[in-house]
Structures are given as structure tokens and as C-alpha cells.
Image (cartoon, rainbow, N blue to C red):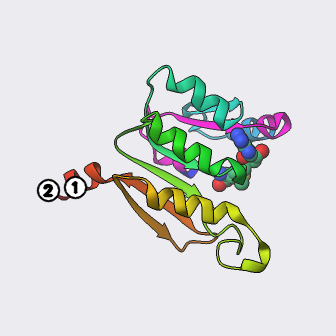
């Protein structure tokens, strides 16, 4: 809702959901907001959505990944392979620490390390890991960051 509130009147927010009852519940709550018209909830797994949207060449000013953790690395790759961010766009990925899995070896959690390795190895990105709550990756293309600095 905060994201929708921050958007201009003609801004659009696409929210993906895989649970039908959560989509229904969210839609009911959102319908009470004056910003409801900006929000589109789509019942579709994120990977399937990206495969579909990539063909349309549609781009996004911001993408926030906060779903199934096992999808984070494939989603990261798909977003940049398909060039889904618009110029100056930002990718946010939640749960960088994955509730301790990133730094506690006893949790034997490969997900945050694989994401870290993938993000670090990707060329041409400007990345910041914000120590907010469960850790938030903020990722932009280096060329956008350099252009903004001029
Ligand atoms: C942590 S919650 C999202 C919270 C929301 N971003 C917020 O900050 O209020 C994750 C939601 O994503 C949905 N989800 C999980 N995996 C998904 C996927 N692969 N594609 C789409 N939605 C997914 C879950 O059903 C759940 O409702």
C-alpha cells in the first residue's frame, strides 16, 4: 500500500500471488483504499509471469522480490537477462540474510550464499545490501548510477 500511495495517479503496481485466498483477501483490503485503482494483483508464480512479460518488452521502474526464497537466484537472472528494469530502475530483493542463513553455518542454508555469489559475479551492477530487518538488496545498473552522478 505504501508503494501505491507513493505512485503518481497514473502509476501502476503489479503484485504477484500464488495463493488464491491471499489474492482475494488482499484485493478486499486494497479495495478500501483510494489508491486501489493503481494496484493489479495477478495470480501467477513470479517465474511464469516474467517468462510471459519478457516477450512483451514491458519494463518496470522498480521490482521488489519477496516470495519463495528458492526462486530468488533464477528471478534475479531472469530480470537482468530479459532487461526488465527501465532506465534508472531498481531491483529490491528482501531476505538477504534469510533469517540468519546467510551468516550461521549451522543452518546449512545455501540460498542467501548463492544469491550473494550470483549478485557479486554479475557484471555492470551497483549493489548495496541494506541492513534493514532481514536484509534488503538494492540493485541498480552501474550505467544508471553513473548517469545520475553526472
Ligand atoms: C512475504 S509475503 C509478501 C509480503 C509483501 N511483500 C509485503 O511486504 O507486505 C510473500 C507472498 O508471496 C507469495 N509468493 C510466494 N512465492 C511466490 C511466487 N513464486 N510467485 C508469486 N507469489 C509468491 C506468497 O503466497 C505470499 O503471499
Q: Is residue 55 above or below residue 119?
A: above
Residue 42's x, y, as percent?
68, 30
Residue 136's x, y, as percent?
55, 64
Q: From this viewpoint, which residue is outermost toward the top?
A: 56
- Dot 1: element: helix
Q: 138 or 116, which lies in front?
A: 116
Cα–Cα gap, marks 1 and 2: 7 Å
Residue 150's mark?
2
- Dot 2: element: loop
Q: Is residue 52 above or below residue 101?
A: above
The magenta region covers: 3-24
In the rendered structure, does residue 69 fall within the stretch colored magenta? Answer: no
Quarter in which the C terminus is drawn: bottom left
Q: 4 or 42, which lies in front?
A: 42
The answer to which image quadrant residue 142 occupies is bottom left
For label 1, the residue is 146
Image side of residue 11 versus residue 13, left or right: left
Image side of residue 113 versus residue 100, left or right: left
Tell me if label 1 and label 2 are in contact, CB under 8 Å: yes
Q: Count residues near mark 2 (Cα–Cα under 10 Å), then give few for <14, some for 14-19, many for 20+.
A: few
Image side of residue 19 versus residue 121, left or right: right
Tell me what residue is drawn at x 54 percent, y 33 percent. Answer: 38
Residue 95's x, y, as percent?
64, 63
Residue 82's x, y, as percent?
46, 33
Tell me what residue is drawn at x 78 percent, y 79 percent. Answer: 106
Q: 27 or 141, which lies in front?
A: 141
Q: Is residue 56 above or below residue 12?
A: above
Amino acid at each position: 500500500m505504501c508503494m501505491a500511495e507513493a505512485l503518481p495517479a497514473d502509476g501502476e503496481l503489479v503484485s504477484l500471488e500464488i495463493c488464491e485466498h491471499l489474492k482475494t483477501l488482499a484485493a478486499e483490503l486494497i479495495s478500501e483504499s483510494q489508491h486501489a485503482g493503481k494496484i493489479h494483483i495477478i495470480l501467477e508464480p513470479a517465474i511464469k509471469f516474467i517468462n510471459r512479460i519478457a516477450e512483451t518488452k514491458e519494463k518496470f521502474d522498480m521490482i521488489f522480490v519477496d516470495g519463495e526464497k528458492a526462486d530468488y537466484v533464477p528471478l534475479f537472472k531472469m530480470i537482468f537477462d530479459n532487461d526488465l528494469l527501465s532506465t534508472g530502475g531498481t531491483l529490491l530483493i528482501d531476505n538477504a540474510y534469510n533469517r540468519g542463513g546467510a551468516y550461521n553455518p549451522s543452518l546449512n542454508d545455501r540460498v542467501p550464499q548463492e544469491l550473494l555469489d550470483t549478485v557479486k559475479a554479475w557484471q555492470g551492477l551497483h549493489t548495496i545490501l541494506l541492513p534493514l530487518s532481514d536484509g534488503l538488496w538494492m540493485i541498480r545498473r552501474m550505467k544508471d548510477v553513473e548517469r545520475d552522478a553526472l
